[in-house]
Amino acid sequence: MVNLDTQIMKIKHSNICQMLKQKFDVERMDRFFRINNDFTFSCNDFTLNHENSIYLSFNSIKNEHSYNLLLIFALSDENVFPHSLQNQIRRISEHNIDKLVIWLRKPIDSEILQSLKRCNANVVHITNKEISNVKYISSFYPIGTDYNYAVVLNKLTDLLIIRLKKLFHLVLSEIAAPTYDETYGSEKIGTKAIMKFEADILKSTIKSIKYKNRSLNTNLDYAVDVGCGTGRHSRNVLASHFTTVYGFDFSPKMIEMANEKKRATNQNNIIFTAADMEYEEIMYEDEYYGLTDLVVASFGMGSFIEDTARMLRRFHEWLKPGGTLFLSFYNKNSVLLNLTPNWRDTSLSAHIDIDTNTLQVQLNEDTLFQIFCKPFDNSIKSEITKKFDVDQIYSYPTTLALLPNSLLQDNLAENLFTKIDKTLSTDTETFLGHYVIIVAHKQASEDLDGYKNVVSILESKAIKYEILDHEAVLSIKDVITELKIDKGVLIKSLVFYRPHEKSYILIVLPHNKRINKTKLADQLQVIPKKVRFATEKEIVHLGFQLGGVPPFGYPGHLKVECYIHPDLLGKNELPFYMGIGDNRKTLKLSSHSFQEIVKAYTVLDQQ
């Protein structure tokens, strides 16, 4: 068994720099930046050179200036970053460096992370779990005689390539921010068309939400604009329909521009913040968690997130019951990936490369970027339908994406093909548009608030309890990590569903026990295939969040058969910990109180 901690601690900075440069070359990423080997920096705390850092230069919009990014590996073992060290890091930026990226072997505290951001430094940490989950190495490079070391290094650098492509997106945003609203989409007709199409569909969606909520003449409560950029949708569409709009983007420069434009228009109901939703905490999240009317992630934003399931789960948690999701992706089935026109005069500013999961973005004639992109396909559609009810799927633009930009600059041609593409946008048989837009909603629950049900039962029985707050969890392992439980009994609740009977089966057992599905089926007197785990949507229908499923508090109008593992019965002086319906909270009860609540449950036969 390979000890990942040991292998990661052994990784030499010179090896990681060497391998990254080789993988840059294989993926032809040098088309998008230059590698400079002449950067050196020395101070009391560390020294930087080509063996422990990589210096990259990107073309900017003004070609006489380049945008310079420095990847630093020399500080990989730091975890405190005292002020003296932060001051030295600030000094690096004085050497014509626009962005610093520091790789760390271990995670750091969020406050230190924010301090480093103020030093113009982003942090990259790849977890052991991420490395373990890598099943395929893009290009394996043997190094040294230790095969396990080489495998871990290759996996790590593959993951770093993915993370760097996302950081290149940040670089792109920083370069484009000052002129983004004025220039992006102004020359490329296909890009301009999708920006207008999305805005029109978004306005129509808001109108439908207001009609459904009988609030045509009043504002809805909350909207969240994910990847808001300079705040185009927040300012031009959302602010006039919602009491509060929360917009965030991973680019501080984009947020700076968004706040400038907000101040110019006195739109004080918009709150803009800089945050990367994949790797950082989002400010004000508690204010709209479970209360949001509309989540917007437009202009292909869905494709820029690596973990689609986690992104969707987070959106689901933000939305109130019945709340709406407006989500946009690049399309893996785009017409441009099926046909290759014989002209280079494209009407789009960005093109998908499905072989490398990247998007090539043309800022101007000389400035081309390659950034991470996960295009929409059936697997992503399946993830969406697991959690949401889909109202409409659009694909757009189709013919505009295929035709040369010079042809479309004629108003007659632009209007004609725009009309054709609007007709094709909802044609599921064609579905060849460059983008995919999903409008979906979280299931509306009438009285399905599992957390309130659990608390209500505790209060009605006058049971003493404690609720422990923590970060959102999705598994028992997450709970153990968050709560650091060393004494006590941790309970997991498994939910099965029988579709023909439309009934649920609840199994309550210690977290370290497994269920024997065959014996469960025997006890239920059914064949095993008639008992399956409930889907995420079916669990949500009970009023609970994945990661917070409780052992009681189920809606009275639903048929739920409850079973309990025998190990949870009998005398126990230790406290019991369990879900309470909200995956940011854990319920703590005495053994006696717990057993009083579940005394009517059937004992599970797993012997």
Image: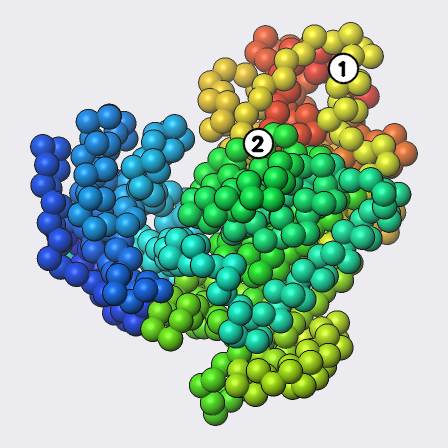
Q: Quadrant of residue 88 in the image?
A: top left
Q: Quadrant of residue 329 in the image?
A: bottom right
The residue drawn where x is 61% and y is 65% is 195
Q: Is residue 429 visible?
A: no
Q: Nearer the viewer, residue 259 or 435?
A: 259
Colour scheme of this structure image?
A: rainbow
- Amino acid carrying label 2: it is Tyr
The residue drawn where x is 54% and y is 16% is 488
Q: Tag 1: Cα neighbours inside 10 Å, few (<14), some, or many (≥20)?
A: some
What percent of the width, then of the height, locates residue 15?
17, 54
The residue drawn where x is 63% and y is 43% is 224
Whichever of labels 2 and 1 marks the residue nearer the N terminus, that label is 2
Q: Is residue 389 above or below residue 59?
A: above
- Amino acid carrying label 1: it is Leu
> Would you name the residue on which mark 1 appears?
458
* Helix, strand or loop for disc 2: loop
> Would you name the residue on which mark 2 appears?
284
Answer with left or right where residue 408 lies relative to residue 137.
right
What percent of the width, then of the height, locates residue 119?
29, 37
Q: Nearer the viewer, residue 268 or 565?
A: 268
Which image quarter holds the N terminus? top left
Answer with left or right where residue 108 lies relative to residue 360.
left
Q: Is residue 99 visible?
A: yes
Q: Is residue 40 above or below residue 599?
A: below
Q: Nearer the viewer, residue 166 or 489?
A: 166
Answer with left or right where residue 478 lies relative to residue 130.
right
What percent of the width, then of the height, locates residue 362?
42, 70
The residue drawn where x is 69% and y is 80% is 415
Say which mark, if any, is on residue 428. Answer: none
Q: Nearer the viewer, residue 493 or 226?
A: 226
* Helix, strand or loop for disc 1: helix
